[in-house]
Amino acid sequence: MSGRFDLLVRGGACVLPSGTAVTDVGVRDGRVAAIGRLDGATADADIDAAGLHVLPGVIDSQVHMREPGLEHKEDFATGTTAAVLGGVTAVMEMPNTRPNTTTAAALADKARRAKGRARCDMAFFVGASGDNLEQLGDLERLPSCAGVKVFMGSSTGNLLVEDDVTLAQVLANGNRRVAVHCEDEPRLRARFALVEGGAPVAMHAEWRDAETARLATERLLRLARGVGRRVHVLHVTTAEEMGLLPEFRDLATVEVTPQHLTLAAPEAYETLGTRAQMNPPIRDARHRDALWRAVDEGLVDVIGSDHAPHTLAEKAESYPNSPSGMPGVQTLLPVMLNHVNAGRLSLRRLVDLTSAGPARVYGVAGKGRIARGYDADFSLVDLKAERTLSDRWSASRCGWTPFDGMRITGWPVATVVRGRVVMRDGEVLGDPAGAAIRFQDTLR
Ligand code: DOR
C-alpha cells in the first residue's frame, strides 16, 4: 500500500484488536488511515518503531489536576506534561477542585482553561452534591463532561453524598455511568477517634478499614440495582468488595490502581510514611492478592491512577493532618509495564485495562484501540528498557512519586496524540493541543 500520510509509525509491534503484529500505521488528519505494510508511502513525519511496541494510547480515567484553586499542587499544564511523559494520551479529571465542579459554569471554566495548555486530551467529571441533584441529568450531557462523580466518603475537599436517600436520587437523575468513591462516611466518622490527635500513619488503613469500603460498595450496588443505573466503582481495594462485584457485572464496572496492585501494608507505611497515605488506603498483601486475582479473572475493567498530587510540605504535616493522595499519572504505565515484564499480566491484558477498558466503561468515541478511523493515539514503549523511577523525573508540580527508587523494566519512549508526536525519548514536543474527549452518549 502506498500513499501520503501526515505520520507513519514504521515497523513497530502493534497491539491491534486482532493481536500483536509487526506492521506500519499510517495517520491522516489525526486518525488511523491505514494499517499494514506501507513500504512505498511517504509522510510529513516518521517514527521508526522497530524494536518497540505500539500500544493504543493510555487513557487515565481518574486524575486530579487541581485547577482551579489548588494550582500550588498541580495545574492542567504540569499535570498533562506528566501524563504524556508517562505515555498517557487522555485523562478524565475529577471535580474536587476549588470551586468544586458542580455547575455548568465550573465545567465550562475547566474546558476553557485546558484549551491551549493541556498536552493530552481531557474530559471532566461533574461532582454530585446535595445542591445539584436535579441538574445532574443535564450536566452530564454537557460538552467535555465525562459523567458524574460521587464521593460516598469524605476525602480531599468537601464533596460528599453520604446517605442512601440522596445517593438514590443521584442515581435516579441521568443515564450515563456514574463513577463512585466507595467509603462509608458514617463509619469513617465513628472510627475517626482511632487517629484523632495523632497516630502512626499505618493507622490510616485501620481507621478507613476494609469494612468501610465494603459497606459503601454494598450500599451503592444495592441502590444501583434498584434504579438500574450503571456505576463504575473506583479504586477497589478489598477482597470483600471483589467478592460482591461478580453479581453486579450487568451494572457495575471496576477500577484498581497501580499503587494498590504494587504497594502493601505495613511495608509501604514504614518506608514511605505519609507519602503512602491515600483514600481508600493501601492495605495488606491479602487484599493486594485479591486485586490481582480479580485482574486475572477479568473482574477488573480499568486501571486508573487516581493521580492526586499534594506538595511534600503538605505531606510533611503529622498524620492525620497530612492530606491523602499520591501522584500517579506519569508512573501508571511504567509501573504496569514492569508487572508485565515480571510475568504478572500479559501486555494484551494491560492494554485492555488501560485503553480499551476506559473507552468501554465510559463510552469514549473513537479511542481505546488501534483501528482504522480511530484517533491516532499511541503509547510507544520499549519493553526491554531499564530505568529507575525518581522524584527528579516527576513533571508534576508536586515533584515526587511514591515509586522513587523503583527499578523498572519497560518504558514509554514516545507518545502520540491524534497524530501529533507530543513526547519522544523523555522530551515534551510541540505546543499543547489537547482537545476534549468525545463520548458516544453525547455525540451530536
Ligand atoms: O487519596 C485520595 N486523594 N483519595 C481521593 O479520593 C481524593 C484524592 C485527592 O483529591 O487528593
Image: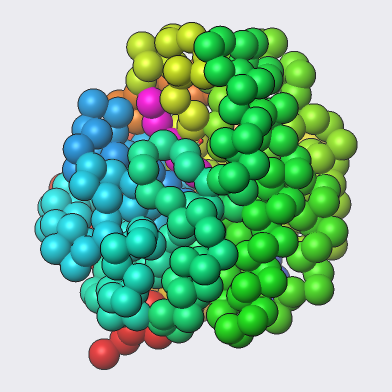
Front-lying residue, 400 or 200: 200
- The residue located at (56%, 80%) in the rendering is 229
- The residue located at (24%, 74%) in the rendering is 143
Count of numbered badges drawn on the protein: 0
- The residue located at (61%, 11%) in the rendering is 199
- Residue 384, position as x, y percentages in the image: 66, 36
Front-lying residue, 364 or 243: 243
Q: Vertical placement of 53 versus 266: above or below?
A: below
Does residue 143 appear anywhere in the picture? yes
Does residue 55 appear anywhere in the picture? no
Image quadrant where one finds the C terminus = bottom left
- Examine the structure image and report whether residue 269 is included in the region drawn in magenta: no
Q: Which residues are magenta?
A: 306-310
Residue farthest along the bottom direction in this orientation: 444
Front-lying residue, 155 or 179: 155
Magenta residues, dominant SS class: loop
Q: Vertical placement of 224 versus 412: above or below?
A: below
Quadrant of residue 186 in the image?
Answer: top right
In the drawing, does residue 119 fall left or right of residue 16? left
- The residue located at (19%, 67%) in the rendering is 104
- Residue 322, position as x, y percentages in the image: 46, 18
- Residue 158, position as x, y percentages in the image: 36, 43
Image quadrant where one finds the N terminus = bottom left
The way the protein has been coloured in the rendering is rainbow
- Residue 405, position as x, y percentages in the image: 59, 15
